Amino acid sequence: VQLVESGGGLVQAGGSLRLSCVASGSTFSINAMGWYRQAPGKARELVAGITYDGDVTNYADSVKGRFTISRDNAKNTMYLLMNSLKPDDTAVYYCNAYTMEKRDYWGQGTQVTVSS
């Protein structure tokens, strides 16, 4: 499975961005997907997750009510809509796929910078 993120950038506090993650390769084996982020000097953390059919989602407390995760399986694409962005949201955002073979795959990451 290969994952490619896009949509990061520089935005002012209060603004919005939409990240995309396109999956290719053995996408039939993907069970769940998620977005993680890692800020400088901090551990990578889960931002949001979604099951294959999109029926179940979960969010970090820090982004609940502001971020929305979704996926379009016909396009092999997952999205993260980020509203009301804060400087604390500044990080590299990574796409993750977890397969039926219990393997994790990661994208290369996309930088999100929120200015105050």
Image: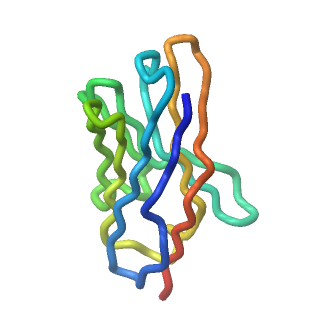
> Image quadrant for the N terminus?
top right
**Residue 61 versus residue 50: which sits nearer the camera?**
50
Q: Residue at x 48, y 46 (%)?
A: 35
| In-image side of 19 versus 74 (left or right) | right
Q: Give coordinates of residue 14: x percent, y percent.
A: 34, 80
- Above or below — where is 40 with respect to 104? below
Residue 41, picture quadrant: bottom right
Q: Give coordinates of residue 42: x percent, y percent.
A: 71, 59
Extreme residue in the front direction: 25
- Above or below — where is 72 with respect to 69? above
- Above or below — where is 26 with respect to 22? above
Q: Give coordinates of residue 21: x percent, y percent.
A: 43, 46
- Above or below — where is 9 with respect to 32? below
Q: Residue at x 55, y 34 (%)?
A: 2
Extreme residue in the right direction: 41
Extreme residue in the top direction: 101
**Residue 17 versus residue 48: which sits nearer the camera?**
17
Colouring scheme applied when the structure was drawn: rainbow
Q: Residue at x 64, y 63 (%)?
A: 39
Q: Residue at x 36, y 68 (%)?
A: 17
Q: How many numbered dots are placed on residues in this image?
A: 0
